[in-house]
Image (cartoon, rainbow, N blue to C red):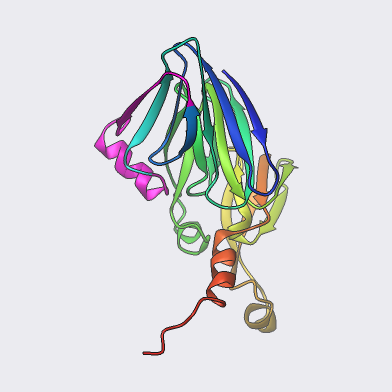
Amino acid sequence: MQYKIKGSTMETIDILLDKGESIYTESGGMAWMRGNIAMDTNTRGGVMAGLGRMLSGESLFLTTYTCQGNQALITFAPEVPGKIMDVELNAGQSLICQKDAFMCAQDSVTLEMHFRKKLGAGLFGGEGFILQKITGPGTAFLEIPGEVRDYELKAGEVMRVDPGHIAMFEPSVSYDISRVKGFKNIFFAGEGLFLAQLKGPGKVWLQSLPLANLAAKLYKYMPKSSS
């Protein structure tokens, strides 16, 4: 498999498949394709696995595209402006991602629901109890709104983040919440009552455009019903 990410604020990714190679995506994830490609849509792992993926922001059904000729080209596009990230995973290596981050992956990559065990992080962490977990071996492609910054946290090092800016992190990073201190900070700083607390060791990826912020900004300019 070969691939190339193209574009800037609204990137697309071209994936060139050789005969017998496959890639899968959520329902409706494919933008265009050329060549002899077979499609197979199913729940991939069973109904319960599909329902778990739905809770994490993906579709119940996933579609696998397999090259039937010598070569075929398939293109995927993100749903919002942002970056497409290519992630190379070794066997057993995992990443924890925000809801709806998954775009597509090689057939060997596993996509599943990730459940936050801590009550506070689930209730006040911004993304709820359910996230996505991808596990190798293979290459996965993620769509991240806005630009992406990455940080390597040392053991015990803590980073506090507005929850909507967390794109993904390694499983070795612990996720919790911390309360904003001070009356004026809580009510007038615009950051809410809680911040996410990421504690190393491990790598974290942060995004510049939380979808909730984008939706709130667009809502201000939408026509309101007079009734």
Specify the farthest residue to the left.
Answer: 47
Q: Say which of 54 and 1 sits in front.
A: 1
> Does the magenta segment cover residue 205?
no
Q: Position of residue 89 (x, y in %)?
A: 58, 25
Q: Residue at x 63, y 37 (%)?
A: 85
Residue 193 higher or lower than 156, as above or below: below
The picture quadrant where one finds residue 203 is top right
Figure check: 93 above or below 161: above
**Bounds of the magenta segment:** 34-58
Residue 160 visible:
yes
Q: Residue at x 32, y 37 (%)?
A: 49
Q: Nearer the viewer, residue 155 or 75?
A: 75
**Considering the image in quadrants, where does the N terminus appear?**
top right
Q: Nearer the viewer, residue 33 or 137?
A: 33
In percent of the image, x 52 and y 21: which residue is there? 137
Tell me residue 126's x, y (percent).
Answer: 52, 61
Horizontal arrangement in the rendering, residue 114 relative to residue 39 (left or right): right
Callout count:
0
Along the horizontal axis of the image, is 59 left or right of 158? left
Residue closest to the far front: 34
Spot occupied by residue 56 in the image (x, y as percentages of width and height): 42, 47
**Residue 17 at x, y = what percent?**
52, 18
